[in-house]
Image: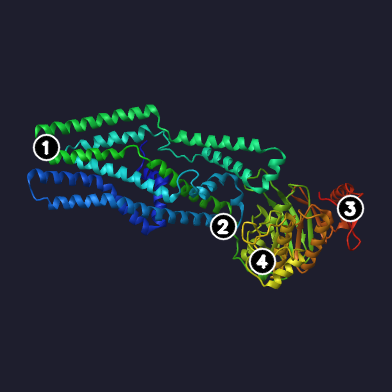
């Protein structure tokens, strides 16, 4: 079945090299036009030099005036000397600009979707690594250097073609003969990585394992365990093994195959022997004058630039991040998209303004895109306006998933989440998130001053200091001190101190108008007494808000007005601490198990209430 022209055109457009040049031309059109113009000049130099040399020789042989011939030769010669240097500078600038454009596109693709599903998809890891690290020089030259390799390859290829076309004046069969002979090297060496993509999935996996071992060896977070468990030899062996495997893969992808090389040499020698043999014969016979012989000999020599070269591997390296980013833009937009509302989004101010909202999960079912089954299934749960509700349950019960859905980082597969009776999908997303303050168990530690960690978008000093005081973090550092030792005057905080800063961030947002608070294991690094004290402060500072707490520690959980036990994706029990204890159900069992482990180590807090010394 014949292949249609449209299909061929579509396949050409889909090729990585085509996508790279399209991206290059569209991203930086001015510099790209200058780069292509200089490329054309350089490609025509070999053919021009052959013609100019022949013209000069002919004028000398005829005893004619050499002015015009020398002028032409001089222009071509100067172009041959100047254009490569200028082209290299333009190419470097173009590479830097293209890198900037690609990085901007990656940032936009990552930050653009309203949800987070695209950042939790493992199948996008290789593309994300390629798109993020392409300019670090790990898998090939950075883009600004690679542009020179691409230019060299294209100049050789196009220059060889232009030189071979000069031979049309010698014999009609000469250009096809040389194009076939020198061009066959591309086909015969097609299995060589000189022409093959070196960024295969296997190469990416080897690089990822190498980088991971390197990070474990150099990052302070892993240093203690590496030494304590005697993992240094294992880690060194793992790094060396994956690194050697990576080098072997890259070597295998770039070495020339002996048989293919021998075949290419035979074809090249045969075609060139035929061409130059006929050329010599005609020259000796007198059918070609000296000018013609010099011109065609020079053109025949210039046509050799068609073969071999490093164009394909350079293009592979440059096209890989372009292809990866184009794929990520599509996949991330799809995976991170939220369900479109059936009605026009309404500002959250239409739902009781800044007052604490009622939050209701109505028959919610949710499965992660890469999950094998639902995490939440037909869950019903209501958090009264202004109330505090704690969610407990075993690991994997769906507690953190509830938090993600409430932040609308995902949308439920079915059912709805209602804010004051309005489907969350019908609220303006930015407005809703501005009303919601949150502390997650994997909160971010910004390498910024303490002030900016508490109020990233800015706030009055009184608000920042008040939030720090309520979180028990006042005095940890000066407000303008960077929270990282790598900066002048930087301060390093402990894990528990960082958690207090994260809590202060949420409290500051409440002071700024947030009316709902989400706390997902917010004090896991604090001791029991410290956690209980901090949570009491947080409840006091967020008394006017609706608060949802996810925690394993019952000394904290029991302070909430309502407690919900989530199990197998459903709300199993709901009530106050006393009501659930009287029910003697799942909550009673969990609480009794935790308390019984430390029945001899009870402490009383400042209010005379018993504190339980552990977390489930």
Q: Is residue 532 left or right of residue 302?
A: right
Q: CA distance from mark 4 to mark 3?
A: 46 Å
Which element carries disc 1, helix, strand or loop?
A: loop
Quadrant hosting residue 277: top left
- Residue 27 marker: none
* Residue identifier under label 4: 451
Q: Position of residue 214 (x, y in %)?
A: 59, 43
Q: Which badge, 4 or 3, comes first in the chain's sequence?
A: 4
Disc 4 to disc 3: CB gap under 8 Å:
no
* Residue identifier under label 2: 111
Above/below status of 186 relative to 133? above
Q: CA distance from mark 2 to mark 3?
A: 46 Å
- Residue 288 marker: 1
Q: Which badge, 2 or 3, comes first in the chain's sequence?
A: 2
Q: Residues within 10 Å of mark 4 (few under 14, many from 20)?
A: many
Q: Which badge, 1 or 2, comes first in the chain's sequence?
A: 2
Q: CA distance from mark 1 to mark 3?
A: 110 Å
Which element carries disc 4, helix, strand or loop?
A: helix
Q: CA distance from mark 1 to mark 2?
A: 68 Å
- Kindly report which numbered mark, 4 or 3, lies closer to the viewer in this rendering: 4
- Kindly report which numbered mark, 2 or 3, lies closer to the viewer in this rendering: 2
Q: Is residue 392 visible?
A: yes
Q: CA distance from mark 4 to mark 1?
A: 85 Å
- Kindly report which numbered mark, 2 or 4, lies closer to the viewer in this rendering: 4
* Residue identifier under label 3: 583
In the rendered image, the quadrant that contains the N terminus is top left
- Kindly report which numbered mark, 1 or 2, lies closer to the viewer in this rendering: 1
Which element carries disc 2, helix, strand or loop?
A: helix
Q: Residues within 10 Å of mark 3 (few under 14, many from 20)?
A: few
In this view, the residue in front, 477 or 138, is 477
In this view, the residue in front, 65 or 297, is 65
């Amino acid at each position: 079945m014949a292949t249609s022209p449209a299909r061929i055109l579509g396949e050409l457009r889909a090729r990585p090299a085509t996508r790279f040049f399209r991206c290059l031309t569209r991203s930086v059109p001015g510099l790209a036009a200058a780069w292509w113009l200089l490329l054309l000049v350089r490609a025509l130099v070999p053919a021009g030099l052959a013609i100019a040399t022949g013209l000069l020789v002919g004028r000398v042989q005829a005893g004619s005036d050499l002015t015009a011939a020398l002028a032409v030769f001089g222009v071509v010669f100067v172009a041959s000397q100047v254009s490569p240097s200028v082209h290299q500078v333009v190419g470097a600038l173009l590479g830097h600009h293209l890198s900037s454009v690609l990085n901007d596109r990656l940032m936009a693709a990552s930050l653009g979707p309203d949800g987070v599903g695209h950042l939790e998809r493992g199948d996008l890891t290789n593309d994300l690594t390629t798109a993020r690290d392409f300019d670090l020089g790990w898998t090939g030259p950075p883009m600004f250097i690679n542009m020179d390799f691409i230019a060299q390859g294209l100049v050789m290829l196009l220059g060889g073609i232009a030189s071979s076309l000069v031979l049309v004046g010698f014999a009609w069969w000469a250009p096809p003969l040389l194009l076939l002979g020198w061009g066959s090297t591309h086909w015969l060496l097609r299995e060589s990585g000189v022409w093959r993509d070196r960024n295969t999935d296997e190469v990416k996996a080897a690089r990822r394992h190498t980088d991971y071992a390197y990070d474990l060896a150099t990052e302070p977070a892993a240093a203690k365990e590496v030494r304590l468990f005697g993992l240094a030899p294992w880690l060194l062996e793992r790094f060396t093994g994956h690194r050697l495997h990576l080098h072997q893969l890259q070597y295998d992808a770039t070495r020339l195959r002996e048989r293919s090389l021998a075949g290419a040499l035979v074809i090249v020698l045969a075609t060139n022997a035929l061409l130059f043999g006929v050329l010599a014969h005609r020259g000796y016979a007198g059918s070609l004058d000296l000018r013609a012989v010099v011109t065609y000999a020079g053109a025949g020599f210039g046509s050799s630039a068609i073969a071999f070269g490093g164009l394909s591997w350079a293009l592979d390296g440059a096209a890989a991040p372009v292809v990866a980013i184009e794929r990520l833009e599509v996949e991330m937009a799809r995976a991170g998209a939220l369900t479109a509302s059936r009605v026009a989004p309404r500002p959250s101010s239409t739902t009781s303004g800044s007052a604490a909202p009622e939050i209701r999960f109505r028959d919610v079912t949710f499965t992660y895109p890469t999950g094998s089954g639902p995490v939440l299934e037909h869950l019903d749960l209501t958090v009264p306006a202004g109330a505090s509700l704690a969610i407990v349950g075993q690991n994997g019960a769906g507690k953190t998933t509830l938090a993600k859905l409430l932040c609308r980082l995902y949308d439920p597969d079915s059912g709805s989440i209602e804010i004051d009776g309005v489907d969350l999908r019908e609220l303006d997303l930015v407005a809703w998130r501005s009303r919601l303050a949150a502390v997650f168990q994997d909160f971010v530690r910004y390498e910024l001053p303490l002030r900016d960690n508490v109020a990233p978008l800015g706030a009055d000093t009184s608000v920042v200091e008040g939030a720090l005081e309520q979180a028990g973090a006042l005095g940890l550092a000066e407000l303008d001190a960077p929270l990282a030792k790598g900066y002048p005057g930087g301060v390093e905080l402990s894990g528990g101190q960082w958690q207090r800063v994260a809590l202060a961030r949420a409290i500051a947002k409440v002071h700024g108008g947030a009316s709902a608070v989400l706390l997902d294991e917010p004090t896991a690094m604090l001791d029991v007494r410290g956690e209980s004290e901090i949570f009491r402060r947080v409840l006091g500072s967020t008394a006017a808000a609706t608060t949802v707490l996810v925690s394993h520690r019952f000394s904290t959980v029991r302070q909430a007005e309502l407690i919900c036990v989530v199990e197998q994706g459903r709300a199993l029990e709901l009530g106050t601490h006393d009501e659930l204890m009287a029910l003697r159900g799942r909550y009673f069992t969990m609480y009794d198990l935790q308390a019984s482990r430390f029945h001899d180590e009870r402490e009383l807090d400042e209010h005379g209430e018993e504190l339980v010394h552990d977390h489930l």
